[in-house]
Amino acid sequence: MEKLQYVQQLKGLLNARQLLDKQIEEYVNELPAIDANIALNGKLELNNRNCYKKLVDTFNDNCYVFSRNTYAINKLASYQPGHMI
């Protein structure tokens, strides 16, 4: 019984991660003047810190609380100012 419980928890976590990835991809696809494929998979330097902060704050307030979601934090780390994505 315990094994089934862990398998269900793992499936729930994986589904939540897929949802987060999908939501990020959908959001990036709607941004004007950005090649979504490069933004999601490429190497771009973040150069607009105000925009980045607004995005992070909005996402944190409305979607995922980063302090409670290590997967989201790791996704966010790819986009930190001064780092390459």
Image: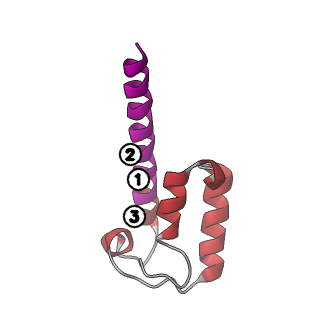
Marks 2/1 in contact by CB < 8 Å: the verdict is: yes
Observer-nearest residue: 43 or 2? 2
Q: Which mark is residue 21?
A: 1
Q: Under tag 1, what secondary structure?
A: helix
Residue at 61 percent across and 55 percent down: it is 66
2 within the magenta span: yes
Where disc 3 sits, the SS reads helix
- Residue position marked by numbered label 2 in the rendering: 18
Is residue 26 within the magenta segment?
Answer: no
User: Is 35 positioned to the left or the right of 63 in the image?
Assistant: left
Q: Which residues are magenta?
A: 1-25
Q: Position of residue 36 (x, y in %)?
A: 36, 70
Q: Nearer the viewer, mark 3 or mark 1?
A: 1
Q: Is residue 82 above or below residue 14?
A: below
Indicate the quadrant containing the N terminus: top left, top right, bottom left or bottom right. Answer: top left
Query: Disc 2 or disc 3, which is closer to the eye?
Result: 2
Magenta stretch mostly in which secondary structure? helix
What kind of element bears circle 2?
A: helix
**Disc 1 crowd, CA 10 A, few/some/many (<14, 14-19, 20+):** some
What's the distance in space between the residues labelled 3 and 1, CA to CA?
A: 12 Å
Drawn side of residue 70 relative to residue 68, left or right: left
Residue 75 at x, y percent in the picture: 47, 61
Residue type at mark 2: give it: Gln
Query: Label 3: which residue?
Result: 29
Earlier sequence position, callout 2 versus callout 3: 2
**Residue 77, image x, y percentages:** 51, 68
Q: Residue at x 39, y 40 (%)?
A: 14
Near-viewer residue (4 or 25): 4
- Spot occupied by residue 83 in the image (x, y as percentages of width and height): 49, 82
| Spatial CA span between label 2 and label 3 | 16 Å
On residue 45, which mark appears?
none
